[in-house]
Amino acid sequence: MATIKKFEEIEAWKLSRELTREIYGATKNADFSHDYGLKDQIQRAAVSVMSNIAEGFERGGNKEFINFLCIAKGSCGEIRAQLYVALDLKYITEENFNHLCKLCNRISMMLYRLIDVLKKSSVTGVRYKRPED
């Protein structure tokens, strides 16, 4: 397995960046853009996914990284819940809803797998790496 040197190499982060871009695009819709509470919350949740992946990685320890990945995964669920509100209020089409939910589910699954790999790893993280390792 290749060693990831920076968070920008993590596939889940790349996909969460795409999700964030698409959420911001969807919230530009006239009705959605005027629902300031929902618009702000879903945008912040999307940014939270990519930010928590990045912050967790930069902490340098697997236990902290796992914690931040769990927060990112939770934010994916939050986005999906908010997408239901947006769909019910007809701020987004069913097609857009399905696409964005699929993206969230994909990221969630990637995060789950990454968490699982980290939990099973004997490596504790770069912060704990000895100079001779």
Image: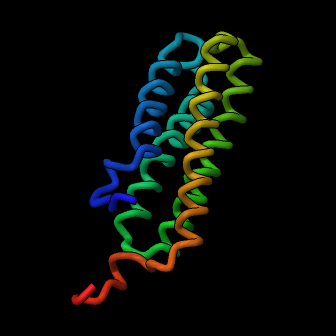
In front of the other: 120 or 105:
120
Q: Residue at x 57, y 61 (%)?
A: 115
108 left or right, relative to 55 = right
User: Which residue in the rendered view is the most extreme toward the left?
Assistant: 131
8 vs 24: above or below = below
110 left or right, relative to 9 = right
Colour convention: rainbow
Identify the image quadrant of residue 85: top right
114 vs 65: above or below = above
In front of the other: 78 or 91:
78
Identify the image quadrant of residue 86: top right
In front of the other: 108 or 75:
108
Quadrant placement of the N terminus: bottom left
Measuring from the top left, give residue 103's x and y in whole percent: 57, 30
121 left or right, relative to 92 = left
Q: Residue at x 42, y 76 (%)?
A: 61
Quadrant placement of the C terminus: bottom left
67 vs 111: above or below = below
125 left or right, relative to 46 = left
Q: Residue at x 55, y 41 (%)?
A: 107
Q: Residue at x 63, y 14 (%)?
A: 92
Identify the image quadrant of residue 95: top right
Measuring from the top left, give residue 34's x and y in whole percent: 56, 19
User: Which residue in the rendered view is the most extreme toward the right?
Assistant: 88
Measuring from the top left, give residue 32's x and y in whole percent: 58, 18
